[in-house]
Image (cartoon, grey):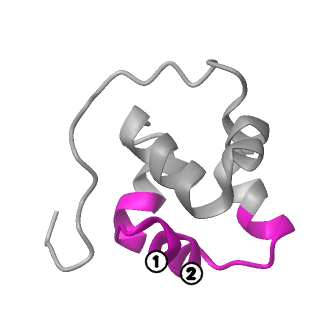
Amino acid sequence: MNQLKVFAIQHSLTQGELAQQLGVTREYLNRIINGQQQLTSSMIGRFAAAFGFAAAETVFGNGSANPQSEKPPCPQQSNC
């Protein structure tokens, strides 16, 4: 199971609530969770800013995320 999804479940967050905390759309977050969108270092940074570096390291590991794309996350008000 995707670690972002596990985190959301463990913290009783819906994907919508987690997306809101990260400043992205639920659809964008869902694409990351389902492996349809590459995880970016920007998204890891957003997660760390929202939940702390310890939580980010727990979810993504110590450098194991290996982000491929540096596309900016889809803003909440955008149709990505």
Look at the image and tell me whether residue 40 can be seen: no
Category of crowding for the residue at label 1, using alpha-carbon neighbours closer than 10 angstroms: few (below 14), some (14–19), many (at least 20): some
Question: Which residues fall within the magenta stretch?
Answer: 8-29
Q: Position of residue 15 (x, y in %)?
A: 57, 73
Q: Secondary structure at mark 2?
A: helix
- Specify the label residue 17 is tagged with: 2
Residue extending furthest right? 10
As drawn, 15 above or below 34:
below
Does residue 76 show up magenta in the picture? no
Residue 29, located in which quarter of the rendered image? bottom left
Residue drawn at the location 22% of the way across and 46% of the way down: 72
Residue drawn at the location 51% of the way across and 42% of the way down: 44
Q: Amino acid at mark 2?
A: Glu
Q: Give how far apart the Cα atoms at labels 2 and 1 are.
A: 5 Å
**Lateral position of residue 59 relative to residue 72, left or right:** right
Q: Position of residue 19 (x, y in %)?
A: 48, 70
Q: Are marks 2 and 1 in contact (CB under 8 Å)?
A: yes
Q: Position of residue 27 (x, y in %)?
A: 37, 68
- Specify the label residue 20 is tagged with: 1
Does residue 25 show up magenta in the picture? yes
- Specify the label residue 73 is tagged with: none
Position of the N terminus by quadrant: top right
Position of the C terminus by quadrant: bottom left
> Which SS does the magenta portion mostly show?
helix
**Lateral position of residue 60 relative to residue 55, left or right:** left
Residue 39, located in which quarter of the rendered image? top left
> Considering depth in this image, is 37 or 10 the residue closer to the camera?
10
Category of crowding for the residue at label 2, using alpha-carbon neighbours closer than 10 angstroms: few (below 14), some (14–19), many (at least 20): some
Q: Amino acid at mark 1?
A: Gln
Look at the image and tell me whether residue 51 can be seen: yes
Residue drawn at the location 28% of the way across and 53% of the way down: 73
